Image (cartoon, helix red, strand yellow):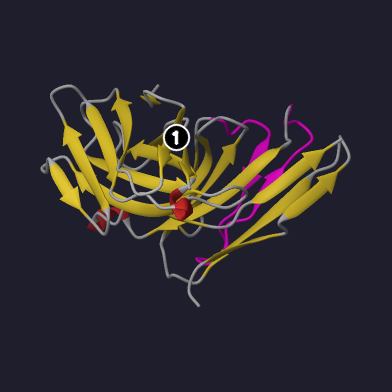
């Protein structure tokens, strides 16, 4: 099946620890995204990547880091500098913007709880 | 920054009735809009999209209407079913055209 996978579905960490969330896609999409969703709120963009080895900050990048070493993978690290890391994290991918393939396909999400 | 808002945070409809979910967007430069459906604990699923050169687009049981004059978007669901219960988000591509801005969502509950 083609799609986007995120693992794990639930993640628990102690405050002060860095944690990396996995996102893999086999849709051959060029662009990938990370969003954060808090209860009762919409999606807020953390980082996005249009192409391998390139990524851009979104609206709430502070306390997060990403890498894009492979087209299929876009891991997100939540660092100890992120003040309120507990949230639902969503990864998405889309085709190349240059051909107008804007539609974003979402993974199932990872719920991170930091105590 | 961008703002995408929904007129109603919650909507309850009887099974079989039609549902209308509204969305106001703020950026007149946005030229692409998407409606997503999100079930509890899952990622959003694409429902339907529309480009700014269109006023209306129909899918299976769903219709999206775009009114650029008042910057308003709506999603109509025909013959609403219990499986339609979810949170619905609209999204616009904003100034840059390559980032999407999502509203807070409308929670739709279908009453059997």
Chain under numbered label 1: B
- The residue that appears at 75% across and 52% down in the rendered structure is A10
Question: Percent from the top left, x then y, of residue B15?
Answer: 40, 47
Q: Residues within 10 Å of mark 1 (few under 14, many from 20)?
A: few
- The residue that appears at 73% across and 29% down in the rendered structure is A84
- The residue that appears at 14% across and 44% down in the rendered structure is B56
Whether residue B88 sits left or right of residue A13 in the image: it is left
| Residue A29 included in the magenta stretch of the image | no
Whether residue A38 sits left or right of residue B30 in the image: it is right
Which residues make up the magenta segment?
A: A60-83
Question: Percent from the top left, x then y, of residue A94?
Answer: 39, 57
Residue A105 higher or lower than B51, as above or below: below
Q: Nearer the viewer, residue A40 or B16?
A: B16
**Residue pointed to by mark 1:** B12
- Quadrant in the picture for residue B98: top left
Numbered disc 1: secondary structure: strand
- Quadrant in the picture for residue A83: top right
Can I make out residue A103 in this image? no
Residue A64 higher or lower than A101, as above or below: above
Q: Quadrant of the N terminus of chain B?
A: top left
Residue A75 higher or lower than B35, as above or below: below
Q: Nearer the viewer, residue B19 or A73?
A: B19
- The residue that appears at 39% across and 54% down in the rendered structure is B46
């Amino acid at each position: 099946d083609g799609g986007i996978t995120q693992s794990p579905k639930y993640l628990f960490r102690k405050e002060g620890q860095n944690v990396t969330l996995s996102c893999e896609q086999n849709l051959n999409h060029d662009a990938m995204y990370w969003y954060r969703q808090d209860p009762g709120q919409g999606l807020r963009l953390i980082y996005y990547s249009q192409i391998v080895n390139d990524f851009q900050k979104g609206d709430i990048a502070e306390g997060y880091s990403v890498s894009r070493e492979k087209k299929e993978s876009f891991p997100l690290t939540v660092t100890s500098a992120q003040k309120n890391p507990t949230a639902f994290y969503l990864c998405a991918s889309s085709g190349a913007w240059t051909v107008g393939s804007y539609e974003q396909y979402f993974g199932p999400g990872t719920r991170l709880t930091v105590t | 920054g961008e703002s995408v808002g929904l007129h109603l945070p919650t909507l309850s409809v009887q099974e079989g009735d039609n549902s209308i979910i509204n969305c106001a967007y703020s950026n007149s430069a946005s030229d692409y809009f998407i409606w997503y459906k999100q079930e509890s604990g899952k990622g959003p699923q694409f429902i339907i999209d529309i480009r700014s050169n269109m006023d209306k687009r129909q899918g299976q049981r769903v219709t999206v209407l775009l009114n650029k004059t008042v910057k308003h978007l709506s999603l109509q669901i025909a013959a609403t079913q219990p499986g339609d219960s979810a949170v619905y988000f609209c999204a616009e591509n904003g100034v840059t055209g390559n980032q999407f801005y999502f509203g807070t969502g409308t929670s739709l509950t279908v009453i059997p």
